[in-house]
Image (spheres, helix red, strand yellow):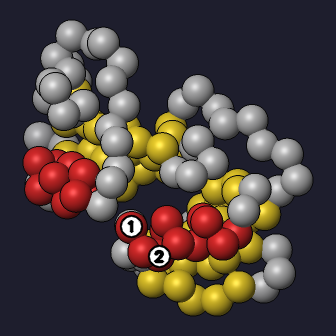
Amino acid sequence: MTGKLIAFVPTLDLVKARSFYEGILELRSVGEDGFASVFDANGTMLRVTKVDRLTPQPFTVLGWEVADINDSVSRLGQQGIRFEHYGMPGQDDRGIWTSPSRARIAWFKDPDGNTLSLTQFS
């Protein structure tokens, strides 16, 4: 495909989701259309879409590449974000896991329980 990517994440509550994605993650809101809150995620359209039922998946549904994962985890932690601990070898007490490729990854959840991630590639 040659078109621009559009990302989707489901929510049961558009008000809570907008507060999280705009207020905590600092994504710029570009509107709402009755079906979704729409954000500019650094050039990618993110549609946080209202659904009637939601079963959060046991895997990452949305992630960001960051330049400094330590800074990002600290900043989000100050906003009340709790990072997930999976008990994997190489995961530190803040929830940052160093993968075999040396990428460093941290996972957290949005208000609906969707798993989101931060990754700093080596």
CB atoms of marks 2 and 1 within 8 Å: yes
Q: Residue at x 38, y 67 (%)?
A: 25
> In which image quadrant can residue 85 be found?
top left
> In which image quadrant can residue 96 be found?
top left
Left or right of 12? Residue 95 is left
Which residue is denoted by mark 1 in the rendering?
25
Left or right of 90? Residue 108 is right
> In which image quadrant can residue 87 be found?
top left
The N terminus appears in which quarter of the rendering?
bottom right
> Cα distance, mark 2 to mark 1?
6 Å
Q: Compared to 20, does 86 lie above or below?
A: above
Query: Can residue 66 be seen here?
Result: no
Q: Residue at x 85, y 45 (%)?
A: 53
Q: Amino acid at mark 1?
A: Leu
Q: Amino acid at mark 2?
A: Glu
Q: Residue at x 83, y 56 (%)?
A: 51
Query: Can residue 57 be seen here?
Result: yes
For mark 1, give the secondary structure.
Answer: loop
Residue 105 position, x and y percent, is 27, 36
Figure disc tally: 2
Count residues near mark 2 (Cα–Cα under 10 Å), then give few for <14, some for 14-19, many for 20+: some
For mark 2, give the secondary structure.
Answer: helix
Q: Residue at x 36, y 31 (%)?
A: 84
Count residues near mark 1 (Cα–Cα under 10 Å), then give few for <14, some for 14-19, many for 20+: some
Query: Closer to the camera, 46 or 2?
Result: 46
Residue 110 position, x and y percent, is 52, 51
Which residue is denoted by mark 2 in the rendering?
22
The C terminus appears in which quarter of the rendering?
top left
